[in-house]
Image (cartoon, helix red, strand yellow):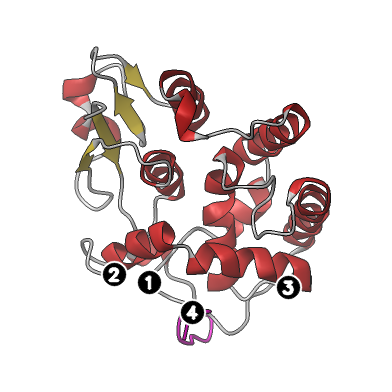
């Protein structure tokens, strides 16, 4: 068992989804513990694991708190080199790391306007100019990566990598809010929605505590767009 992974509400915590996928999708066993977004503050609930104050936080077997998803990814890749977190090919690996870093630091308009909510889906959503720019950028970098390194498969740089784990919540946002993207991007979104690990997380999210009203949007709702049904 590779330590303890502290996570937030499955339905709403996009970074927790990323952190969990870095273990689950690569076959690394870890104990999981969840904090509530409804009750006390996250930092307060993590007081026993100081200096951690955000989720996800990975407590390594040595007791070190690793509290950034990118740091978790790199530390796991160092400790489990056979798990395949990054592509083996140097060019594909460089692309995957670039995509991951851009996700970690960017797309703020999309993330703030369309927070992750795995319990609902909407038929239409207003798309401000800044969100449209983020979606156009996603189309550009996803198409480039898949055309050059995707090897004809569904993922960005060949086999599933850290980059795909980082974009899983973005795929969920596009599905939830019916956001306008290219057919190529929709294919990539469908790959995430069909992925067994993602589906396990979403299934668990449906009964994972109360609905949080501050995530709700007053848009027309529809059924979750499941590509397998």
Say which quarter of the image contains residue 62.
top left
Residue range of the region highlighted in magenta in the rendering: 218-229
Out of 84 and 8, give the one closest to the viewer: 84
Q: Residue at the spot x=73%, y=51% of the render?
A: 150
Q: Are marks 1 and 2 in contact (CB under 8 Å)?
A: yes
Q: Which residue is mark 4?
A: 226
Q: Where does the image place residue 197, in percent across and percent down from the top left?
A: 39, 57
Q: Are marks 2 and 3 in contact (CB under 8 Å)?
A: no
- Residue 141 as seen in the image, left or right of residue 73: right
Q: Nearer the observer, disc 2 or disc 4?
A: 4
Could you give the CA–CA distance between mark 2 and mark 3, rounded to whole angstroms? Answer: 25 Å
- Can residue 23 be spotted in the picture? yes
Helix, strand or loop status at disc 2: loop
Helix, strand or loop status at disc 1: loop
Out of 112 and 99, give the one closest to the viewer: 99
User: For residue 119, which numbered disc appears in the image?
Assistant: 1
Say which quarter of the image contains residue 166.
top right
Q: Nearer the observer, disc 3 or disc 4?
A: 4
Number of other residues with Cα within 10 Å of mark 3, as a class: few under 14, some 14 to 19, many 20 or more: some
Q: Are marks 1 and 4 in contact (CB under 8 Å)?
A: no
Q: Earlier in the sequence, mark 3 or mark 4?
A: 3
Could you give the CA–CA distance between mark 1 and mark 2, rounded to whole angstroms? Answer: 6 Å
Q: Which residue is mark 2?
A: 206
Helix, strand or loop status at disc 3: loop
Q: Where does the image place residue 118, in percent across and percent down from the top left?
A: 41, 66
Q: Earlier in the sequence, mark 2 or mark 3?
A: 3
Q: Which residue is mark 3?
A: 180
Q: Earlier in the sequence, mark 1 or mark 3?
A: 1
Please check the rendered image and state whether residue 91 is part of the magenta-colored stretch, yes or no. Answer: no
């Amino acid at each position: 068992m590779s330590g303890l992974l502290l996570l937030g509400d499955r339905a709403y915590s996009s970074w927790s989804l990323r952190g969990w996928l870095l273990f689950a999708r690569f076959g690394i066993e870890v104990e999981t513990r969840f904090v509530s977004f409804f009750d006390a503050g996250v930092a307060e609930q993590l007081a026993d694991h100081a200096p951690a104050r955000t989720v996800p936080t990975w407590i390594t077997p040595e007791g070190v708190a690793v509290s950034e998803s990118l740091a978790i990814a790199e530390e796991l890749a160092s400790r489990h080199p056979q798990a395949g977190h990054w592509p083996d090919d140097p060019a594909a690996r460089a692309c995957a790391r670039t995509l991951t870093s851009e996700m970690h630091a960017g797309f703020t308009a999309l993330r703030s306007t369309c927070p992750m909510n795995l319990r609902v889906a909407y038929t239409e959503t207003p798309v401000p100019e800044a969100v449209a720019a983020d979606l156009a950028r996603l189309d550009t970098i996803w198409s480039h990566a898949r055309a050059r390194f995707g090897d004809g498969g569904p993922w960005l740089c060949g086999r599933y990598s850290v980059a795909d784990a980082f974009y899983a919540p973005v795929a969920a946002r596009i599905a939830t809010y019916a956001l306008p993207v290219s057919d190529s991007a929709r294919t990539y979104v469908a790959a995430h929605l069909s992925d067994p690990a993602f589906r396990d997380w979403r299934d668990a999210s449906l009964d994972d505590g109360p609905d949080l009203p501050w995530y709700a949007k007053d848009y027309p709702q529809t059924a979750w767009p499941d590509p397998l049904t």
